[in-house]
Amino acid sequence: MEADELLVLVAGGDQKAFEQLYGLVSGPVFGLVRRVVRDPAQSEEVTQEVLLEAWRSAARFDPGRGSALSWILTLAHRRAVDRVRSARAAVDREQREGRRYHDPAFDQVSEEVEAGLERELVRRCLNRLTALQRQSVTLAYYDGYTYREVAERLSLPLGTVKTRMRDGLTRLRHCLGGAA
């Protein structure tokens, strides 16, 4: 029997027809819900809710407006989207509440002082590099150029820039690591 015929029988309370309908549509329903919800456990739960809704509201199905499968998949899509929205709203509520009652676990003044000290240490370590290494590192890490762009900007071969960068970064790591 086709899903359309089975759903009409389900509307009359036929449990056997529902078992057959369940076998026909549960796979496509779960697949659709899984794509929307993503979480397997939530997808199983939503699929069960949709099939229960199909059992309870089968009398509302109108074969003149479309197939039984498309009607059930529409129910599934709506329920899955509702679940995602509900979950998102719950997370948003929790985050708002968390921010409302959150006392910062840090002292902003000490954080700023520490950041300033770290910046000064980096400046001192950069000054220990050769001028060529410092120029390459500064262009790449502070100005955001790629190695290739640094090479073009300095009119140097890419390999030379890579070597300067490697040597400069190695010296920086030793300088910063030794001070830490």
Image: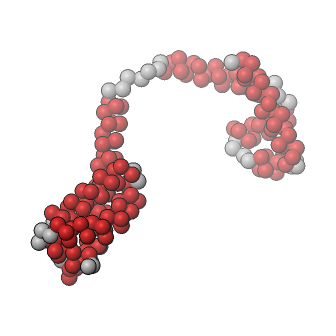
Residue 60, given in percent of the width and then of the height, sits at: 15, 71
Q: Name the residue: 77% across, 37% down.
A: 137
- Judged left or right of residue 89, residue 130 is right
Q: Is residue 47 above or below residue 100?
A: below
- Judged left or right of residue 99, residue 63 is left
For the residue pair 162 and 91, the one nearer the viewer reads as 91
For the residue pair 58 and 105, the one nearer the viewer reads as 58
- Judged left or right of residue 151, residue 83 is left
Q: How many marks?
A: 0
Residue 72, given in percent of the width and then of the height, sits at: 26, 68
Q: Name the residue: 51% across, 18% down.
A: 109
Determine the residue located farthest toward the left in the rendered image: 12
Q: Residue 6 falls in which quadrant of the image?
A: bottom left
Q: Residue 7 falls in which quadrant of the image?
A: bottom left
Q: Is residue 156 above or below residue 67?
A: above
Q: Residue 78 falls in which quadrant of the image?
A: bottom left
Quadrant where the N terminus sits is: bottom left
Determine the residue located farthest toward the front in the rendered image: 16
Q: Name the residue: 31% across, 33% down.
A: 97
Q: Can residue 126 be seen?
A: no
Q: How is the image coloured?
A: secondary structure
Q: Is residue 30 above or below residue 146?
A: below
Q: Name the residue: 66% across, 25% down.
A: 119
Quadrant where the C terminus sits is: top right
For the residue pair 23 and 80, the one nearer the viewer reads as 23
Q: Can residue 107 be seen?
A: yes
Residue 58, given in percent of the width and then of the height, sits at: 17, 69
